[in-house]
Image (cartoon, rainbow, N blue to C red):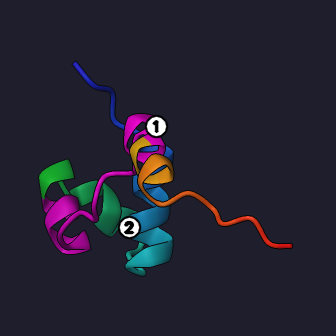
Amino acid sequence: MRRLDFAAMMRAGICGLGLRPAEFWALTPAELRLMLGPAGPEPMRRDRLIELCRRYPDEERS
């Protein structure tokens, strides 16, 4: 089971959305997620970065 990152959730709700603390604590995690909108793409993994580096190597400059 994944633990909830309450510090990040509080920053997103209180700083990002401008909720008052009482409003934040009245929400469920699912409601907060809904208010924050769709999640962005997942971070690139190392294997994908290696694949891209092989496909598109840096060109040497003289």
Q: Which amino acid does label 1 sit on?
A: Arg
Left or right: 28, with 14 as reference point:
left
Residue 5 position in % (x across, y down): 42, 40
Q: How crowded is mark 2: few (under 14 residues within 10 Å), some or many (20 or more)?
A: many
Q: Which residue is drawn at 28% across and 65% down?
A: 40
Left or right side of 36 for 31: left
Q: In which quarter of the image is the C terminus?
A: bottom right
Q: Residue 33 in magenta?
A: yes
Residue 27 in the image: state x and y as whole percent: 20, 58
Q: Which of marks 1 and 2 is in front?
A: 1
Q: Give the range drawn in magenta.
A: 31-50
Q: Are marks 1 and 2 in contact (CB under 8 Å)?
A: no
According to the picture, the residue beneath numbered tag 1 turns out to be 46
**Which label's residue is closer to the chain start, 1 or 2?**
2
Label 2 sits on a secondary structure element that is helix
As displayed, is residue 60 above or below residue 30? below
Q: Which residue lies furthest to the right in this view?
A: 62
x and y percent of residue 12 in the render?
A: 42, 65
Quadrant occupied by the N terminus? top left
Name the residue tied to disc 2. 13
Q: Which x, y percent locates residue 34?
A: 14, 67
Residue found 22% across the figure and 62% down from its top: 32
Residue 31, picture quadrant: bottom left
58 to the left or right of 44 = right
